[in-house]
């Protein structure tokens, strides 16, 4: 790449694509000064040429078919920002790499599933594949793991990596509103992915966690092994009860690697209020990394939005211009036994909320079942609930998740519950 200019094509002109064009324009001279290379947008593509945009695209060649751009001899780098539509993004990336073009993408779901395939192909063709914007928006966590922390043996990483869920949980708490109400607001504000299940079902966090895990631990990409649970069953009552005992509820993504075993999990957790994780509000993301040399290091910042995400995309373009490392680190070869299930070995305390029939003997039967699985209650309170029901809130002493699951299954069979109990692990981080 002995060029003084890199020709860039931007595919996808939504919030992030428009932000990338704006930022490249704004930073043109600075980038040239620092890298000696001009990053020049030469072509753009999106679904609709006539759509009102916050950026003027008239100086660029408009190409209706994005797959054509991937073969265009005048283009050096493809910036793919169209998301997971109809396999198009996948075809663009493969076609671009096959045609010797560098690729920058923010496509977390595609990378989580196929990143290692792209990595192999990019290696074979000698091109760069970079994806800083795929995880945690403006936080440069990919580069940190690929570069700055490379000599650290990392044992654990955890954090909040979905801004939409954190926005919803924070607003439920601060405005004492129910889940559905705040979810509708987040949708109206344009925070929620076009398929909302990605956000609220924890899947978006799982995509990001799978990428971070293989960067951090050198394991192979294994998105399917991420145990995933969302936030849509939570109520303001859970948040308020957690608050009373000194905790906040966060959708926590956590990955741990030890003795060839990788544990990856996304689920709501009770986090002690004093933890930095609990203090992250709104759409902000936070990631803590535990490394042998650095101890615990915490990164926090905007997890989405035009400016932060464009900043990450453009930083990848600058890295390509500066000829930074080609490896994506998405093809680790460390042993990775994800079948291991720590619910049979790790003990934790849990928060439980039951909606019960308000009848004599119900609590005795319920606590009897818990006791029969060796589960000891730490705190418990009953609250009135309309229509002859009772809300029972409790926390347990440390117990195995597997025993609790069995007890909850048996409790459901007693037909004393009006709905599935809410069960959240109390996580000490
Ligand atoms: N839906 C994502 C989030 C956008 O809420 O974090 C950024 O990846």
Image: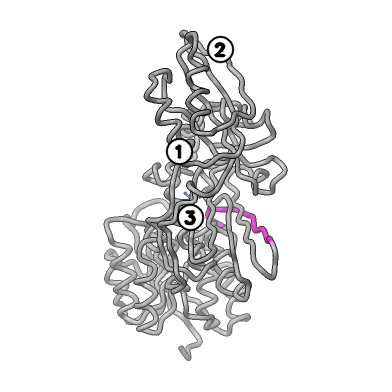
Q: Image quadrant of residue 137? A: bottom right
Q: Check contact, mark 2 vs mark 3: CB within 8 A.
A: no
> Does dot 1 land on a helix, a strand or a loop?
helix
Q: Residue at x 65, y 43 (%)?
A: 278
User: Could you tell whether 88 is left or right of 18 in the image?
Assistant: left
Q: Which residues are magenta?
A: 296-307
Q: Does mark 2's beta carbon lie closer than 8 Å to ligand 1? A: no
Viewer-proximal residue, 143 or 378?
A: 378
Q: Work out whether mark 1 precedes mark 2 in sequence or the reverse, and give the earlier one.
A: 1
**Residue 417 horizontal/vertical position (percent):** 43, 20
Mark carried by residue 187: 1
Q: Does mark 3's beta carbon lie closer than 8 Å to ligand 1? A: no
Q: Work out whether mark 1 precedes mark 3 in sequence or the reverse, and give the earlier one.
A: 1
Residue labelled with disc 3: 264
> Does dot 2 land on a helix, a strand or a loop?
strand
Residue labelled with disc 2: 384
> Does dot 3 land on a helix, a strand or a loop?
strand
Q: Work out whether mark 2 precedes mark 3 in sequence or the reverse, and give the earlier one.
A: 3
**Residue 57 horizontal/vertical position (percent):** 42, 63
Q: Residues within 10 Å of mark 1 (few under 14, many from 20)?
A: some
């Amino acid at each position: 790449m002995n060029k003084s200019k890199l020709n860039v094509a931007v595919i996808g002109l939504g919030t992030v694509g428009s932000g990338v064009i704006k930022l490249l324009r704004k930073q043109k001279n600075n980038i040239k000064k620092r890298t000696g290379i001009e990053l020049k947008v030469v072509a753009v593509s999106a679904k609709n040429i006539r759509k009102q945009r916050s950026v003027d695209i008239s100086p660029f060649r408009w190409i209706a078919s994005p797959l054509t751009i991937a073969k265009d001899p005048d283009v050096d780098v493809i910036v793919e920002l169209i998301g997971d539509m109809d396999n198009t993004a996948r075809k663009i990336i493969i076609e671009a790499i096959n045609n010797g073009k560098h690729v920058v993408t923010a496509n977390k779901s595609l990378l989580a599933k196929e990143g290692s395939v792209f990595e192999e192909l990019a290696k074979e063709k000698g091109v760069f594949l970079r994806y800083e914007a795929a995880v945690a928006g403006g936080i440069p966590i990919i580069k940190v793991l690929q570069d700055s922390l490379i000599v650290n043996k990392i044992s654990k990483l955890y954090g909040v990596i979905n801004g939409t869920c954190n926005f919803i949980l924070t607003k439920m708490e601060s405005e004492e509103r129910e889940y559905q109400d705040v979810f509708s607001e987040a949708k109206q504000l344009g925070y929620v992915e076009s398929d909302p299940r990605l956000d609220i079902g924890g899947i978006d966090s799982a995509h990001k966690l799978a990428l971070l895990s293989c960067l951090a631990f050198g394991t192979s990409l294994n998105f399917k092994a991420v145990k995933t649970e969302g936030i849509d069953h939570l109520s303001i009552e859970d948040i308020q009860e957690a608050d009373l005992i000194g905790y906040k509820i966060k959708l926590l993504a956590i990955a741990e690697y030890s003795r060839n075993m990788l544990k990856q999990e996304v689920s709501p957790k009770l986090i002690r209020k004093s933890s930095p994780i609990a203090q992250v509000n709104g759409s902000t993301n936070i990631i803590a990394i535990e490394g042998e040399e650095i101890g615990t290091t915490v990164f926090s910042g905007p997890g989405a939005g035009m400016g932060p995400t464009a900043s990450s995309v453009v930083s990848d373009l600058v890295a390509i211009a500066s000829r930074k490392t080609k490896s994506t680190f998405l093809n680790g070869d460390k042993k990775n036994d994800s079948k291991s299930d720590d619910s049979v070995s790790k003990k934790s305390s849990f928060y439980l909320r039951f909606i019960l029939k308000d009848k004599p003997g119900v609590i005795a039967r319920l606590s009897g079942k818990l006791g029969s699985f060796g589960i000891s209650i730490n705190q418990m309170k009953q609250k009135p609930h309309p229509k002859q029901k009772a809300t029972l809130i409790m926390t347990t002493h440390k117990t195995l998740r597997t025993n609790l699951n069995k007890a909850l299954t048996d409790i459901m069979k007693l037909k004393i519950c009006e709905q599935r109990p809410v069960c959240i692990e109390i996580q000490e981080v």
